[in-house]
Image (cartoon, helix red, strand yellow):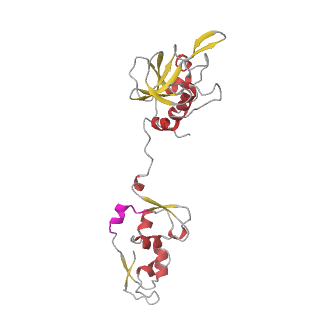
Amino acid sequence: MMTKLSLQQFIDKYNGKSVDYDGYYGFQCVDLFNFYNEEVVGAPRLGTPITNGARDLFEVDSAARRAYYDVVSASASLQAGDVLVYGEPQGRVIINNVQMFLGHVNIYIGNNEVIEQRGRKGEVVSVDPLFTNGLLGVLRPRSFETHSPAPDVPEQNQNKNKHIIVGGDTFWGLEEQNGWEHGTLQALNPEMVATELQIGDEMIIPSQQEEAQTINETYYTIRRGDTFWGLEDAWGLAHGTLTALNPNDNPRTLQIGQSIRRS
């Protein structure tokens, strides 16, 4: 399903452009509406089956319109996002010597302004002052975003920084390089296996607030049969971590009862 635009995103996307939705009749007011209907409201195309003009959007009922819009009187107070549909005297054309009024459509954006094509700048989409001359009525979307939606960020990852893994990266190496306590990256990325980091994967690294916090060092007392290699396997540490944490201890001469730094 296509992600819907907010009203503001729609304005930013189309203001100052010329748009042709269906490839017929050039750049018409209904073309801009069709993009709004699809990208902001998320509705199927309504169509203009009787006059082939904008006024059909209000004057011709359809199941799609009933599903996605409420029909509101022209005298009602306007809300941002309302679709304004006009009849005579808007959209005047002469076909076979017969004068017709195909109407006009624009979108109310608040502050007595509308966004429209075939308005003040002709074939260029523009933000223009609101007018109500010939207003037939209003189509009010039942569901849409007025403002840009906030990004969907998992709570546990908010205020975190990101790092893209490159060749040679290890948890221990990044922690040493940045002065982070060993074990920090594994705690922030519990789903990652320290010995199987993949180039191009994204990992969470400490935010500035977390960098300012002190993570307590932890220690372990050597027992019979312990080796750095075996302990690293048991604790899920990259090989070499304990040697780096205990530079003054010889891994070949560990003594029972000896205290080593674990993190």
In the rendered image, the vertical position of residue 236 relative to residue 229, given as above or below: above
The image quadrant of residue 188 is bottom left
Q: Is residue 64 left or right of residue 75?
A: right
Q: Is residue 100 left or right of residue 182?
A: right
In the rendered image, the vertical position of residue 89 relative to residue 20, given as above or below: above
In the rendered image, the vertical position of residue 18 relative to residue 132, given as above or below: below
Viewer-nearest residue: 260 or 121? 121
Quadrant containing the C terminus is bottom left
Viewer-nearest residue: 8 or 138? 8
Viewer-nearest residue: 98 or 196? 98
Report the residue at 62% width, 13% height from top: 94
Report the residue at 50% width, 32% height from top: 41
Image coordinates of residue 31 in percent, x first then y, are 58, 28
In the rendered image, the vertical position of residue 89 relative to residue 17, given as above or below: above
**Is residue 141 visible in the rendered structure shown here?**
no
Most extreme residue toward the bottom is 253
**Is residue 91 visible in the rendered structure shown here?**
yes
Most extreme residue toward the right is 96
Image coordinates of residue 5 in percent, x first then y, are 50, 38
Report the residue at 36% width, 62% height from top: 208
The image quadrant of residue 132 is top left
Region rendered in magenta: 205-214
Image coordinates of residue 96 in percent, x first then y, are 67, 11
Report the residue at 41% width, 67% height from top: 184
Viewer-nearest residue: 176 or 19? 19
Quadrant containing the N terminus is top right
Most extreme residue toward the top is 98
Is 253 within the magenta?
no
Image coordinates of residue 133 in percent, x first then y, are 46, 16
